[in-house]
């Protein structure tokens, strides 16, 4: 049963990472472009473009040729939830005594696999600090 949960998490983590990154770029720079997404993820522009096309087909983003990429309401909801989950895990790891660099790297993987039950416990732990 746990293998099924992990496989399902792997299916969504790429989408969540892209949407979270797009939201971050929009907040910081006012725009999100393929070149910046590829650079941030350390991948080829063609690879980023393929995923962006899939996200557009799934209704998470909007884009026009030679323009910035924007999140739809559906995409914004996923990005916001993913960012909140990331921040909860990050804060939890820092509260355990990990340095920020290690906590940040670990949170990036854990955030996609943590259950809602565990996340609630992390939030409770964080608020008691």
Image (tube, rainbow, N blue to C red):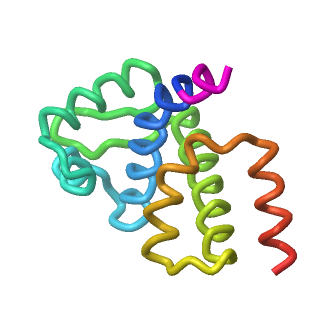
Instruction: Considering the whole magenta stretch, tell me its main secondary structure.
Output: helix
Residue 80, image x, y percentages: 60, 49
Residue 86, image x, y percentages: 58, 57
User: Which residue corresponds to the image point at 38% horizontal and 33% vertical from the top-left?
Assistant: 62
Quarter of the image that includes the N terminus: top right
Q: Relative to 43, does residue 56 appear above or below in the rendering?
A: above
State yes or no: residue 89 in magenta: no
The residue segment tinted magenta is: 1-6
Q: Answer with left or right where residue 95 lies relative to residue 100.
A: right
User: Which residue corresponds to the image point at 77% horizontal and 49% vertical from the top-left?
Assistant: 118
User: Which residue corresponds to the image point at 33% horizontal and 22% vertical from the top-left?
Assistant: 54
State yes or no: residue 3 in magenta: yes
Query: As rendered, which of 108 and 1 lies closer to the eye?
Result: 1
Q: Answer with left or right where residue 31 lies relative to residue 34.
A: right
Q: Answer with the quarter of the image where residue 44 lies.
A: top left
Q: Answer with the quarter of the image where residue 129 lies.
A: bottom right
Residue 69, image x, y percentages: 32, 42
User: Which residue corresponds to the image point at 39% horizontal and 49% vertical from the top-left?
Assistant: 22
Query: As rendered, which of 102 and 61 lies closer to the eye?
Result: 102
Q: Relative to 42, does residue 13 appear above or below in the rendering?
A: above
Residue 31, image x, y percentages: 32, 55
Q: Answer with left or right where residue 67 lies relative to residue 77.
A: left
């Amino acid at each position: 049963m746990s293998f099924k949960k992990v496989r399902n998490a792997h299916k969504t983590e790429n989408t969540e990472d892209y949407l979270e990154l797009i939201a971050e770029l929009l907040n910081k720079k006012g725009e999100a472009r393929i070149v910046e997404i590829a650079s941030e993820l350390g991948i080829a522009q063609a690879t980023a473009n393929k995923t962006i096309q899939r996200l557009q087909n799934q209704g998470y983003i909007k884009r026009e040729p030679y323009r910035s990429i924007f999140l739809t309401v559906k995409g914004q909801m996923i990005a916001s939830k993913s960012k909140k989950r990331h921040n909860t895990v990050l804060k939890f790891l820092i509260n355990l005594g990990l340095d920020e660099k290690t906590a940040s790297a670990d949170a990036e993987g854990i955030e996609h696999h943590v259950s809602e039950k565990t996340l609630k416990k992390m939030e409770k732990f964080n608020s008691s600090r």
